[in-house]
């Protein structure tokens, strides 16, 4: 390391530091006494705060300066297992085994082995070399007096073993593998923890203009790096100045990417080569296939020619299992699947058109958006399409038409993820529209398992590499779901809501199953670590997952057979019909079918929204308010006092009116009763205050189609009629509600049609607002009834006499023969109210005010 150059040097003698301070304890002495001066006090200006120095020595300052920052970079040398010829790939097991067998037959190999082991060759040998030696492995090894030894077949040793052999035998006898050394230790109990996950790191797009993270790929050696592809998939709507770069991140350094990959067009997909960790394959937005070698830098090493590339963005790229490790496959929405060799990228080695009609016409091809290739099935590959169909293909078929084997149809939109189960390749996972589905190759008509329909769109999914029953899905609302169908099938075992604030578009699981990387709409790659239970193979999990797959497959086969029988019966009935009747059948109108489907779709959406709003309203508590009326003149003349007192906005205290101050026996008893309400009003509250606190907020719900009831209840003379109806100068809740209700109806009459039902007693739900295309109108039906002495009277038409309660065909209790009056404004409704009020039967109150006994309700 180099020495740091000294820029500034401060030098000072020790004698200039000043004399050392010595302190001693002694009594205080008065040296001078200056009395206060009033003239000086007038000129005094207070200074706060006051900073003053008390150090007697010379002031000195200390300066600090940051040293020059050195940026560190990690550089390494790729070490590959040596000693192999150029034509032998050490990663290929078959090639290494074939080479070993070839070398073992060489005579020089036998001589080298015997020299390394320092073993004397036996006197006699059978024909053919014997390159290996077999030492005894039994724990009670032979002593030096033993003369029998385990030697290669056909060989014999005529003397005691050499020193090296004897040393190896003694080492072999050092530990008895059949002896229990730690049998007295207590077994450690494994505690089952609940499924959980935590965020480890976040890698954000370093560009100012954020781009969606479209694909992720783990480094094949150690998974210490993560490659992220960034691209804006909005056709011709990408903002100006958006970068095309994609990055490779080091998991321990989220601040700056390790390498920037610079393609000519944004990368939609990016994959590491599993055999060479320095090579990456990318699919570009313009349809080209690019290849990078990180040892050569950030620029593209190999690029396909635009004439022989895809015509649409490349959504899927996969490395194939080959001897050279240079073959790959790509898929695009132009309906083509191409095979490439990165050593020659001028044109693809093979092209398959995804035409399920097997006519090999590109205009009929289905757009490919996901790919699946299993190394254990080298001739088979699967393609997920934009139309929600999975196409199973055979690469080694003789003709192009035979390469498309079968299809699986079940999704309503593009299939964004397609992957075989790593333990059971016959079963594969698809993610599209609002569901994730598990399929079996034995059942083609329907999936064997599927998730519930989510409210948010699903964007990606993947199996766990270590657990056969666990898979992961991402959603547009930023949620990551972890499913374990052995543990729970209806709901995810763990749902991580708001992994980030935007939509999640892609995910990738590490090889050990412990880490999950998720890419978002704004280019944020989030690294999460799951709990040990989600990344550890459970006991009997393979058997349980296999039994579930087999059971569901059998069930689907039975259902398919039943459906096939029904279709044959229907086909037979259709063939037996008359040809004339067939011709008279009306042709289906496509526009009508589309309109009907749209109406049904929006009807389902509106019903779901209404159901959720209704549940929210049910959960919301119903407010209860109390109003204390003032004492009348007649009550004051009789000597009445006020016993209800409002303490605060919610509490009311009732005093005991029979309290006797001379009652000694009950002097220590509490004569107060306190009550708590949502709102409390005393006698000073105005009609406007009561209306604003209790009823004003209900208007918005009423014009949306919900019932809103204000119920006034209390004994005779408590002020129910005054609160509900009021006077001309102080209108009550009824009049104020009508004014605000009709005002709200007029403001929104251009969008909705209203029908509001009002009554004193009968509570009927107002019809749901209907969306119409013609001219809209708002009207009000007016009903007034009274129950008095258990008899029902029609206040708008008293001549009808007493009415009866009856139940209609829908099970709704109604008053038979009730009169309904339509009103179009609040003034007419108020007049009808006054007409009905005249006909009310009242019972005189004890106070003599003539108001009725009972209750008043406003709906």
Image: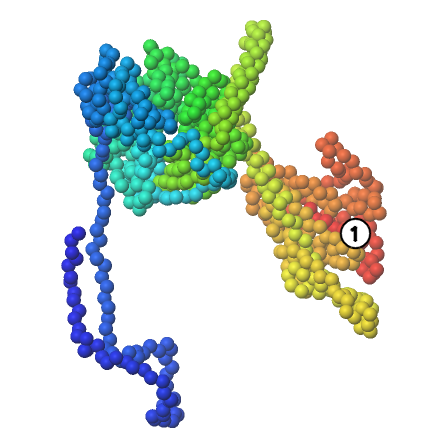
Viewer-side residue, 179 vs 623: 179
Q: Is residue 54 visible?
A: yes
Residue 692: x and y, percent? 62, 56
| Residue that appears at 35% across and 37% down | 213
Image height check: is 395 above or below 516?
A: above
Residue 323: x and y, percent? 27, 21
Identify the element where label 1 is drawn.
loop
Among all residues in the image, which is located at the extreme front? 145
- Picture mark count: 1
Image height check: is 307 above or below 513?
A: above
Residue 77: x and y, percent? 21, 36
Image height check: is 185 above or below 641?
A: above
For label 1, the residue is 854
Viewer-side residue, 472 vs 268: 472
Viewer-side residue, 467 vs 159: 159
Residue 367: x and y, percent? 37, 23
| Residue that appears at 43% across and 43% down | 198
């Amino acid at each position: 390391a180099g020495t740091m150059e000294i820029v500034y040097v401060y030098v000072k003698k020790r004698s200039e530091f000043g004399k050392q301070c010595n302190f001693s304890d002694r009594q205080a002495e008065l040296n001078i006494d200056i009395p206060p001066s009033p003239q000086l006090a007038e000129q005094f200006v207070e200074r706060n705060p006051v900073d003053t120095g008390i150090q007697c020595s010379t002031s000195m300052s200390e300066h600090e300066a940051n040293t020059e920052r050195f940026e560190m970079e990690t550089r390494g040398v790729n070490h590959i297992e040596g000693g192999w010829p150029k034509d032998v790939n050490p990663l290929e097991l078959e090639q290494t085994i074939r080479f070993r067998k070839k070398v073992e037959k060489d005579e020089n190999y036998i001589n080298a082995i015997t020299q390394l082991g320092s073993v004397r060759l036996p006197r006699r040998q059978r024909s053919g070399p014997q390159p290996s030696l077999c030492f005894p492995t039994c724990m009670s090894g032979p002593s030096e007096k033993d003369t029998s030894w385990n030697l290669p077949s056909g060989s014999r040793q005529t003397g005691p073993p050499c020193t090296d052999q004897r040393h190896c035998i003694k080492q072999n006898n050092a530990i008895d593998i059949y002896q229990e050394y730690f049998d007295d230790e207590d077994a450690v109990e494994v505690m089952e923890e609940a499924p959980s996950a935590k965020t480890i790191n976040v890698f954000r797009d370093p560009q100012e203009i954020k781009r969606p993270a479209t694909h992720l790929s783990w480094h094949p050696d150690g998974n210490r790096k993560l490659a992220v592809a960034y691209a804006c998939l909005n056709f011709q709507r990408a903002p100006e100045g958006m970068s095309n770069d994609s990055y490779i991140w080091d998991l321990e350094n989220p601040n700056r990417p390790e390498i920037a990959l610079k393609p000519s067009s944004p990368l939609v997909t990016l994959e590491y080569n599993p055999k060479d960790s320095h090579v990456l394959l990318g699919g570009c937005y313009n349809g080209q296939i690019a290849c990078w070698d990180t040892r050569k830098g950030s620029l593209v090493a190999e690029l396909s020619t635009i004439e022989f590339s895809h015509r649409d963005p490349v959504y899927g790229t996969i490395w194939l299992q080959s001897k050279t490790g240079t073959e790959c496959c790509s898929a695009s929405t132009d309906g083509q699947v191409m095979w490439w060799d990165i050593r020659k990228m001028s044109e693809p080695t093979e092209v398959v058109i995804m035409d399920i009609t097997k006519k090999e016409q590109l205009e009929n091809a289905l757009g490919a958006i996901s790919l699946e290739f299993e190394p254990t099935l080298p001739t088979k590959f699967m393609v997920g399409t934009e139309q929600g169909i999975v196409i199973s293909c055979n690469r080694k078929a003789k003709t192009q038409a035979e390469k498309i084997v079968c299809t699986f149809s079940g999704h309503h939109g593009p299939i964004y993820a397609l992957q075989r189960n790593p333990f059971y390749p016959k079963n594969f996972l698809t993610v599209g529209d609002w569901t994730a589905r598990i399929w079996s190759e034995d059942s083609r008509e329907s999936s064997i398992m599927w998730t519930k329909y989510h409210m948010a769109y699903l964007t990606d999914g993947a199996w766990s590499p270590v657990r056969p029953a666990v898979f992961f899905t991402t959603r547009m609302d930023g949620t990551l779901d972890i499913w374990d169908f052995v543990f729970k099938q209806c709901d995810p075992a763990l749902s991580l809501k708001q992994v980030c604030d935007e939509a999640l578009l892609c995910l990738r699981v590490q090889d050990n199953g412990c880490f999950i990387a998720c890419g978002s709409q704004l280019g944020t790659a989030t690294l999460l670590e799951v709990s040990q239970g989600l990344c550890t193979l459970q006991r009997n999990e393979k058997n349980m997952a296999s039994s579930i797959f087999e059971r569901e497959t059998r069930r689907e086969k039975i259902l398919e057979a039943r459906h096939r029988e029904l279709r044959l019966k229907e086909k037979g009935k259709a063939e037996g019909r008359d040809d004339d009747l067939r011709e008279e059948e009306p042709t289906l109108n496509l526009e009508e079918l589309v309109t009907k489907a749209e109406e049904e779709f929006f009807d389902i959406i509106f019903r779901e929204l209404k159901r959720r709003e209704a549940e929210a309203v049910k959960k919301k508590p119903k407010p209860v308010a109390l109003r204390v009326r003032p004492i009348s003149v007649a009550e004051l003349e009789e000597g009445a006092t006020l016993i209800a007192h409002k303490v605060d906005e919610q509490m009311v205290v009732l005093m005991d009116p029979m309290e006797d101050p001379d009652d000694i026996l009950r002097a220590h008893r509490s004569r107060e009763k306190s009550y708590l309400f949502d709102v409390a009003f005393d006698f000073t509250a105005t009609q406007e205050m009561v209306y604003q606190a209790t009823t004003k907020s209900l208007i918005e719900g009423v014009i949306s189609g919900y019932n809103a009831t204000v119920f006034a209840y209390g004994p005779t003379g408590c002020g129910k009629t005054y609160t509900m109806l009021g006077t001309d100068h102080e209108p009550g809740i009824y009049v104020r509600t009508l004014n605000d209700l009709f005002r709200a109806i007029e403001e929104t009459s251009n969008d909705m049609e209203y029908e509001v039902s009002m009554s004193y007693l009968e509570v009927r739900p107002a019809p749901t607002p209907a969306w119409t295309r013609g001219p809209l109108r708002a009207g009000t039906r007016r009903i007034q009834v009274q129950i008095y002495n258990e008899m029902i009277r029609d206040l708008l038409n008293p001549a009808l006499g007493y009415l009866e309660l009856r139940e209609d065909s829908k099970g709704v209790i109604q008053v038979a023969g009730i009169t309904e009056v339509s009103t179009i404004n609040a003034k007419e409704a108020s007049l009808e109210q006054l007409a009905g009020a005249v006909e009310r039967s009242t019972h005189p109150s004890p106070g003599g005010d003539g108001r009725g006994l009972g209750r008043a309700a406003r709906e």
